């Protein structure tokens, strides 16, 4: 009985052990499954995190490349715009220079006509239309206007104040109410040219413009400019204008060369002697208005050289002939100069082509000169006669101590490309030689 009980107990114990082993195995397997599931989940999460990071990196890389591309495109656009702007500015600058040169050429042409116009006024002769147009453009040079009390007294005031400044050096007198009023009366027509222009900064049109004051113009000063008394030689000034706009605003602006509101229009700066030089024809016109018989004494101030030949009054026809002849010579000299410099030609001429062009110009102007001589009944000029003879002896030098041949020689030395005939024409044009006839 005891043996049977022990066997039963052992079997029961073994059965319990197997049951516990099965439970432990199931628990172990369950833990392994849970671990694998967690491992799989963690792996998926890690891969998802990696994918997310990769996506962010790719997005950042694409964004960076897009920014680099946009930056490159913007750089190209800015470069192109700057190039176009620079080209536009250069074109505007060239247009400005061209317009300024045309303005200067017209002014020089007007000044060259003044002697003949003054001559006709002195003789109480009617002025040709082109002479009247000169005085319309330059009313401050018309002696008939300077007979008027206000205009004449304004010129007298300007001349007196400038004389005082020249003696004392007190530039402040230029900004006195008396001088400012006189300057506005003399040059008001020039100051008013800005009326009607649109100022983009003010966003309004200009309705009035008048002289306001003289202001120092900045310039680079050199040690050589400083004089022993401490003053600076060559000090320059600019005119400032009081500009009134349509919107009611007023602004003080410097006078520019073109008289425009363009930002690249440079300020007109001048030395006191330059202002005196510009005003000299005005003073001469005033002297003629006050005392016409002083014409012969003052006319040389305009030309800058002494008058030669007879002091008798020229007839209007002779004055017109002299003017037409002078213009013809000037046109010929310019045409020859353009050929020499290649101005206006896509490819400058050289060799036989250049010689042929010069001969063509000379033949053309010779024919025109002969027609002009025939029209006015004048004897042919030396350059239109051709043939032998010493052409230098047919001209009179305007330079003391230098004969006509010496003047021509100096012009040829200054420009090796000039022929003797070209040098003679340029010397006549610039007033260094006169016709000896």
Image: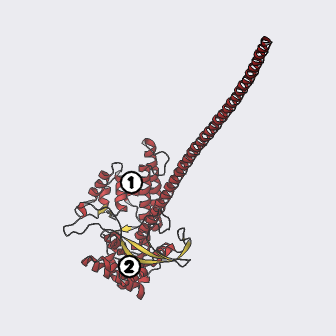
Q: Residue furthest bottom?
A: 149
Mark 2 neighbour class, 10 Å CA radius: few under 14, some 14 to 19, many 20 or more: many
Relative to 112, 208 lies left or right: right
Q: From mark 1 to mark 2, how far is it between C-alphas?
A: 40 Å
Q: Is residue 396 above or below residue 420?
A: below
Residue 109, percent from left and from top: 43, 67
Residue 134, percent from left and from top: 46, 73
Residue 269, percent from left and from top: 37, 67
Which badge, 1 or 2, comes first in the chain's sequence? 2
Relative to 332, 287 lies left or right: left
Between tags 1 and 2, which lies in front? 2
Q: Which residue is mark 2?
A: 285
Mark 1 neighbour class, 10 Å CA radius: few under 14, some 14 to 19, many 20 or more: few
- In this rendered view, identify the residue nearer to me: 219 or 148: 219
Q: Quadrant of the C terminus?
A: bottom left
The answer to whether any part of residue 373 appears in the image is no
- In this rendered view, identify the residue nearer to me: 359 or 158: 158
Q: Residue furthest front?
A: 1
SS at mark 1 in the image: loop
Q: Which residue is mark 1?
A: 386
Which disc, if any, is residue 275? none
Image quadrant where residue 430 sits: bottom left
Relative to 63, 293 lies left or right: left
- In this rendered view, identify the residue nearer to me: 15 or 315: 15
């Amino acid at each position: 009985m005891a043996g049977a009980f022990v066997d039963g107990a052992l079997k029961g114990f073994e059965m319990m052990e197997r049951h516990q082993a099965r439970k432990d195995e199931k628990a172990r397997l369950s833990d392994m499954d849970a671990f694998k599931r967690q491992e799989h989940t963690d792996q998926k999460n890690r891969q998802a995190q990696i994918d997310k990071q990769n996506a962010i990196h790719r997005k950042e890389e694409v964004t960076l490349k897009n920014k680099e591309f946009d930056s490159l495109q913007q750089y190209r656009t800015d470069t192109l715009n700057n190039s176009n702007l620079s080209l536009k500015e250069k074109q505007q600058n060239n247009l400005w220079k061209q317009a300024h040169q045309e303005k200067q050429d017209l002014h020089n042409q007007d000044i060259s006509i003044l002697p003949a116009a003054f001559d006709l006024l002195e003789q109480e002769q009617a002025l040709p239309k082109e002479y009247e147009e000169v005085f319309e453009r330059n009313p401050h040079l018309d002696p008939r206007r300077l007979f008027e009390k206000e205009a004449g007294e304004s010129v007298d005031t300007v001349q007196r104040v400038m004389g005082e400044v020249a003696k004392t050096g007190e530039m402040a007198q230029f900004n006195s109410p008396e001088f400012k009023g006189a300057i506005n009366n003399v040059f008001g027509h020039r100051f008013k040219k800005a009326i009607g222009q649109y100022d983009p900064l003010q966003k309004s049109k200009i309705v009035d413009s008048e002289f306001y004051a003289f202001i120092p113009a900045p310039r680079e000063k050199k040690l050589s400019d400083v004089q022993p008394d401490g003053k600076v030689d060559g000090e320059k000034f600019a005119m400032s204008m009081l500009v009134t706009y349509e919107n009611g605003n007023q602004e003080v602006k410097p006078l520019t060369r073109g008289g425009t509101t363009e930002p690249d229009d440079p300020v007109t700066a001048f030395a006191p002697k330059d202002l005196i030089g510009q005003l000299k024809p005005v003073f001469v016109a005033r002297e003629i208005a006050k005392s016409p018989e002083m014409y012969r004494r003052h006319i040389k101030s305009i030309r800058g050289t002494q008058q030669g030949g007879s002091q008798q009054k020229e007839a209007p026809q002779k004055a017109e002939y002299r003017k037409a002849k002078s213009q013809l010579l000037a046109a010929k000299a310019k045409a020859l100069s353009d050929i020499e410099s290649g101005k206006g030609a896509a490819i400058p001429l050289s060799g036989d082509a250049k010689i042929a062009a010069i001969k063509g110009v000379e033949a053309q102007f010779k024919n025109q000169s002969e027609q002009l001589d025939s029209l006015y009944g004048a004897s042919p000029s030396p350059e239109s006669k051709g043939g032998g003879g010493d052409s230098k002896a047919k001209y009179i030098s305007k330079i003391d101590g230098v004969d006509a041949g010496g003047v021509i020689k100096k012009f040829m030395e200054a420009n090796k490309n000039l022929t003797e005939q070209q040098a003679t024409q340029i010397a006549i044009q610039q007033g260094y030689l006169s016709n000896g006839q």
